[in-house]
Image (cartoon, grey):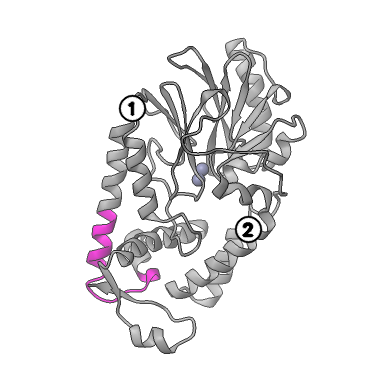
Amino acid sequence: MTKPSQRYVTSTGRVIYSFPVRSFPTLVNNIYVIDSGEELILVDCGSGMPQANDDLAAGFVAVGETFGRAMSLADITTILITHGHIDHFGGLNFVRRFTGAPIGVHILDRRVLSNHEERVVFAYRRLGDFLESAGVAAEQRESLMSVYLFGKTYYQSTPVQFLLEEGLPAVGDIGVYHVPGHCPGQVCLQVDDILLTADQVLSRITPHQAPESITHHMGLGHYLDSLDKIAALPGCRLGLGGHEDPMDDIPARIEAIRQAHDNRLGKVMDICRAPKSITEISRDLFGRVDSYHVLLALEEAGAHVEYLHQRGELVAANLEEIERTNHPVVRYRRA
Ligand SMILES: [Zn+2]
Ligand SMILES: [Zn+2]
């Protein structure tokens, strides 16, 4: 059971409609349509999986039926993609069947949309390197990497028509804030007094982190800097995330997320009283988890270890081995 469509009105009277799409069996995304009368702006479009596409089409019908504002994908005048994660842009091939509306994304995520096949290969290779140095055994590495590829290979590259740039208002005077960390080119979009927070700030979960050794402009340091940027924005009455529920106190939510990362960093420092690989640290932090969650846990642990290592709080405990071995497993200990 997914939530019904919602309607929000900004301080200048612009309307934002929202409805859920089921991107993957356990992941629901929020889709937003900004209606300024002249422009109809679609923000994100789901994963492109059959269920997500069905939900996307049904969401437009539901908005018409619930709020008396008839609209369809063919009426969209602009498409904004908040970041280059497949659950946010994977539906572009489907959307393109109905509209030639220009697609905008931040420059650091453009190639994920427009040169996807290359991007997947590079990310796949770097993920393999990360898992190897994290101490994941060869067999499990292969299965984790095939899990990574699942859900990424059906998307076909689509050209991007314009870029979302920090400080330059996007179509319809929408404020653009670049918030790297969770994804290189993630943006939050300010529509008057409402902030579309994408996956930077969510109402319940702490947004996923991965090390920037896999992808530049990701990593916990960038993410925390981006949290500071959003916390300082004036005049945001309501936050609407890429998943989960609306947030009527964005600063409080940001503070809770920051606290969660501080706690996790403290735990990693505790764990590393004795030398540990990222695989061992991940298991100590998250216990035994299944399938896709193994990969998420390793990336999350890796991001926190990388953050502490970059700042000299953790050091390599097996430097000699790292120096003389090809593809060494790195063990970390407190400095
Ligand atoms: Zn995301
Ligand atoms: Zn997401």
**Mark 1 beta carbon near ligand 1 (under 8 Å):** no
Residue 57, image quadrant: top right
Q: Give the residue drawn at x 45%, y 48%.
A: 180
Would residue 236 be seen by someone viewing this image from the given angle?
yes
Magenta region = 263-280
Say if 85 sits above or below 29 in the image. below
- Alpha carbon distance from label 2 to label 1: 36 Å
Q: Magenta: predominant secondary structure element? A: helix
Per the image, the residue denoted by label 1 is 234
Disc 2 vs disc 1: which is toward the camera? Answer: 1
Q: Is residue 38 left or right of residue 12?
A: right
Which x, y percent locates residue 292?
52, 57
How far from the left and from the top, in percent, is residue 129? 51, 72
Residue at 42 percent of width and 53 percent of height? 209
**Which of the image's four quarters has the C terminus?**
bottom left
What SS does tag 2 mark?
helix
Q: Is residue 268 above or below residue 103?
A: below
Q: Residue flagged by tag 2: what amino acid is it?
A: Arg
Q: Nearer the viewer, residue 225 or 182?
A: 225
Q: Nearer the viewer, residue 38 or 219?
A: 38
User: Is 169 displayed left or right of 206 in the figure?
Assistant: right
Where disc 1 sits, the SS reads loop
Nearer to us in this view, 29 or 227: 227
Image-quadrant location for residue 98? top right
Say which of 222 and 270 sits in front: 222
Q: Residue at x 39, y 42 (%)?
A: 205
Q: Is residue 331 magenta?
A: no
Badge number at residue 218? none
Could you tell whether 290 is left or right of 226 in the image?
Answer: right
Determine crowd level at label 2: few under 14, some 14-19, many 20+ residues with C-alpha closer than 10 A: few
Q: Position of residue 288 (x, y in %)?
A: 40, 62
Point out which mark residue 119 bears. 2
